[in-house]
Image: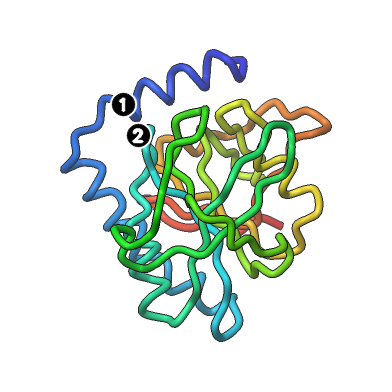
Amino acid sequence: MDNIALRQRIRKQRRTLSHAQRKHSSSLASLHLPKLAKLLPKNANIGLYLDDFGELPTAPILKFCQKHGFMPYLPITAKNKPLTFAPCFYDLGKTPLKRHALGMKEPFYKNIIKINQLDCIICPLVAVDKQGNRLGMGGGFYDRTFTTFKGLKVGWCYDFQVVERLAVNDWDKGVDIVISDGGVIRVG
C-alpha cells in the first residue's frame, strides 16, 4: 500500500474510535511511560502535542511529566520552518491556546525555547514502521524539526498504526522509540 492510501486508511480508522476506546488505549500506552523515564535526565524538558485529530490521547503524557518533575512544552508552527516550543501548564486549562491555520491547538504566548533545550520530543504520527520510520500528516513540521534535534524522538500511537515497513523519502526523519497501547519498540 502506498503512503497516501495508508495515510487515508489509518486516519479513517482513528476517527472511528469512540471516546472510551481512545481513553482505554491511552491508558494502556501510559503503562509504558516509566520505561521512557529511565532514559531521561532529572527535570527533563519534554515536547509533546495536543491530540485533536483522533490521535492517541496525550493527557497521560502530561500526568507522566508532572509525576516525574518533567517540564512539558507544546509546539508552535510556522510555515515551512521547524517547530518551536513553548512551555505549558500541567493543567492545560491554564495554558493560553489558539488554533493555527491547520486547525491544531498551540500556545498563544511566545515564551519560546531553542529546540535543543528539549531532552525529548513525543510526536504524533499517522503510521510508523518497526525501524522507526514515521509517516506524518504531510506538513513536514516534525521532519524539519528532527533534522537538527539531538534529543530522544518518541512516536506515540495506537498499535494499529505500527506497520511492517514504510516507503521513505530522503527528507523523512524517524523516531528512536515507539510507544503504543501494544507496547514499546526501541529502534536501533
Q: Is residue 56 left or right of residue 119?
A: left
Whether residue 185 appears in this view of the structure is no
For image coordinates 39% across by 67% down, the residue present is 89
In depth, the one of 57 and 110 nearer the eye is: 110
Q: Is residue 152 left or right of residue 21?
A: right
Quarter holding the N terminus is top right
In depth, the one of 123 and 159 nearer the eye is: 123
Which residue is labeled 2 in the image?
54
**Label 1 near label 2: C-beta < 8 Å?**
yes
* Rendered location of residue 21, percent (x, y): 21, 41
For image coordinates 40% across by 35% down, the residue present is 160
* Rendered location of residue 20, percent (x, y): 16, 43
Whether residue 112 appears in this view of the structure is yes
State how many labels appear.
2
Q: Residues within 10 Å of mark 1 (few under 14, many from 20)?
A: few
Which residue is labeled 1 in the image?
15
Mark sitting on residue 128: none
Real-space Cα separation, disc 2 to disc 1, in angstroms: 5 Å
Q: Earlier in the sequence, mark 2 or mark 1?
A: 1
Q: Tell me the amino acid under the disc marked 2.
A: Gly
Task: Check the image and name the residue furthest to the front.
Answer: 109
**Colouring method of the image:** rainbow
Q: Is residue 10 left or right of residue 112?
A: left
Q: Residues within 10 Å of mark 2 (few under 14, many from 20)?
A: some
Q: Tell me the amino acid under the disc marked 1.
A: Arg
Quarter holding the C terminus is bottom right
* Rendered location of residue 72, percent (x, y): 48, 66
Image position of 101 with respect to 187: above or below: above
Q: Could you tell me which secondary element the residue under label 2 belongs to?
A: loop
